Structures are given as structure tokens and as C-alpha cells.
Image (tube, rainbow, N blue to C red):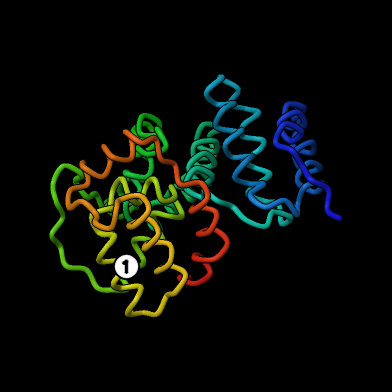
């Protein structure tokens, strides 16, 4: 029988990180634990909030290079912090390579930075790469977006937002697109995606999605919804279906 690992045990061991080889041994020990990288990234961000930047970067460096991790939940934060780390060290080109990769692979990267409270850090780094990246796709959350999107584009947007911030992020920024996305998933016969979107629509929004994103955001905040169980379903099943 597999050993049950408690979060408290993980946190206690992560508190012992002093060197990169400590992190490598930790990953090797728990390599079969789902979401290990996600837990470590969250821990690293907590360290940064406590001004323990160097220790946090040991974690990011090892996550980036370690083959034992099954899944990285937040490559936006990982690549951003590695870009920031190398630029701070003076390895400008190496740092730029992470930021360029990130900005060119994530359409709405500035929105993603804002969601992670990285906007201030981004403003310091942006001059290094501004001439080598595409413009960020920003959808104004204060106005209804009437742009017509293809089925593939709707599902790609759903996949991207879910990968960067889960259902909370998708619904906050693009919840007014849910019914369109649901219809697209039905046409494309994405059965697991259909099941999840219908669950969100019926269980949380009583069968009809508001047409304005600010209304959706206010409902989510008022009810303190975080969609943990639904996000788990996405990570295990829907990502495989849409990728």
C-alpha cells in the first residue's frame, strides 16, 4: 500500500531546504506524489513573500531541471521566476530566454502576471525583452467581449486559462464565454469537458451564465468559490482530452 503523505510532513521537510541537493533529494523521495511541483511552487512563492528569495530560487532551479517530477502545474510562475533569477545574477541572455519563451507561448501573459501579483516585477523585467516578444492579448474585463471565436479558439482559451489559474481564473476573466465553450465542446465531442462545464453552469450558476464578467466575478467573490474539486478533475482528465 502506498504511504499517505500529509502536507504538514512535506512542509516540515521543505523547511530544511538549505542547498539545491536538499531539494533534489526531496523531489526524488516524493517523485510519485501528484502535484508535487505545484506544492513546491506555492511554497517558493511564500518564501519570496518572506524575503527568502535565494532559497525560493533553489526550488525553482531544481524543479526546472529535475526529471522526476510528474507534473508542473504553473509554468508561468516557474519560467517567470527563472527569468528574473538569471537577470538578477547578470546572466541576461539566459534570463531573457525564459521570459521570451513565456511571453511568446502565453497569449495573455500580462493578465497572467497580474493574476499572480507579479506585475511590479514584470515592469522591471519588461525592458529587457520588450523588442523580442509579441504584444500581450488583454481582454478588458469591464466590457463585454463580442468577438466571434471558432470552436478551436474557444477550447484553446479554456485550456490556457485552466492551465494558468484554474476555473477561478477562467470564470473570472472569460466566464461569459462558458456557454459558447460548452457548445463548442459538444460539437467537438469533448465529453469530459462538457461534463465539467455543465456542472459549473448548473451547480454554481443555476443553469444560466451571466453575460458580464464583472457580474460573474462578484458572484464568485461573494460565495468564496475556489473550485478545488473541479480543478482536480481538469488536471487528471480534461487536459488530456483537449491537448
Q: Which residue is drawn at 38% across and 51% down?
A: 103
Q: Residue at x 15, y 62 (%)?
A: 147
> 119 or 70, which lies in front?
70
71 versus 125 height, above or below: below
Question: Where's residue 161, x and y in %?
Answer: 38, 54
Question: Where's residue 61, x and y in %?
Answer: 64, 42
- Residue under circle 1? 182
Question: Where's residue 144, x and y in %?
Answer: 14, 51
Q: In this view, does 169 lie to the left or right of 5?
A: left
Q: Which residue is drawn at 20% across and 51% down?
A: 210
The extreme top residue here reads 50
Q: How many marks can you see?
A: 1
Residue 142: image quadrant is: top left
Residue 112: image quadrant is: top left
Quarter holding the N terminus?
bottom right
Query: SS of the residue at dot 1?
Result: helix
Amino acid at each position: 500500500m502506498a504511504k499517505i503523505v500529509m502536507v504538514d510532513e512535506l512542509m516540515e521537510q521543505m523547511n530544511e531546504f538549505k542547498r539545491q541537493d536538499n531539494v533534489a533529494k526531496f523531489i526524488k523521495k516524493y517523485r510519485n506524489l501528484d502535484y508535487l511541483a505545484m506544492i513546491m511552487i506555492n511554497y517558493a512563492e511564500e518564501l519570496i513573500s518572506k524575503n527568502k528569495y535565494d532559497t525560493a530560487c533553489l526550488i525553482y532551479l531544481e524543479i526546472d531541471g529535475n526529471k522526476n517530477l510528474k507534473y508542473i502545474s504553473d509554468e508561468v510562475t516557474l519560467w517567470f521566476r527563472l527569468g528574473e533569477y538569471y537577470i538578477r545574477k547578470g546572466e541576461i541572455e539566459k534570463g531573457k530566454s525564459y521570459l521570451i519563451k513565456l511571453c511568446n507561448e502565453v497569449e495573455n501573459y500580462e493578465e497572467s502576471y497580474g493574476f499572480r501579483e507579479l506585475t511590479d516585477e514584470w515592469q522591471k523585467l519588461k525592458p529587457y525583452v520588450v523588442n523580442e516578444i509579441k504584444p500581450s492579448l488583454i481582454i478588458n474585463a469591464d466590457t463585454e467581449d463580442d468577438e466571434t471565436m471558432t470552436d478551436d479558439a474557444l477550447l484553446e482559451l479554456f485550456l490556457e486559462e485552466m492551465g494558468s489559474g484554474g476555473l477561478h481564473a477562467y470564470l473570472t476573466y472569460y466566464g461569459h464565454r462558458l456557454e459558447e465553450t460548452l457548445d463548442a465542446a459538444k460539437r467537438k465531442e469533448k465529453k469530459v469537458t462538457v461534463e465539467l462545464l455543465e456542472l459549473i453552469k448548473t451547480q454554481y450558476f443555476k443553469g444560466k451564465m451571466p453575460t458580464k464578467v464583472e457580474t460573474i466575478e462578484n458572484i464568485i467573490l461573494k460565495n468564496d468559490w475556489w473550485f478545488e474539486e473541479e480543478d482536480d478533475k481538469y488536471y487528471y482528465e480534461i487536459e488530456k482530452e483537449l491537448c
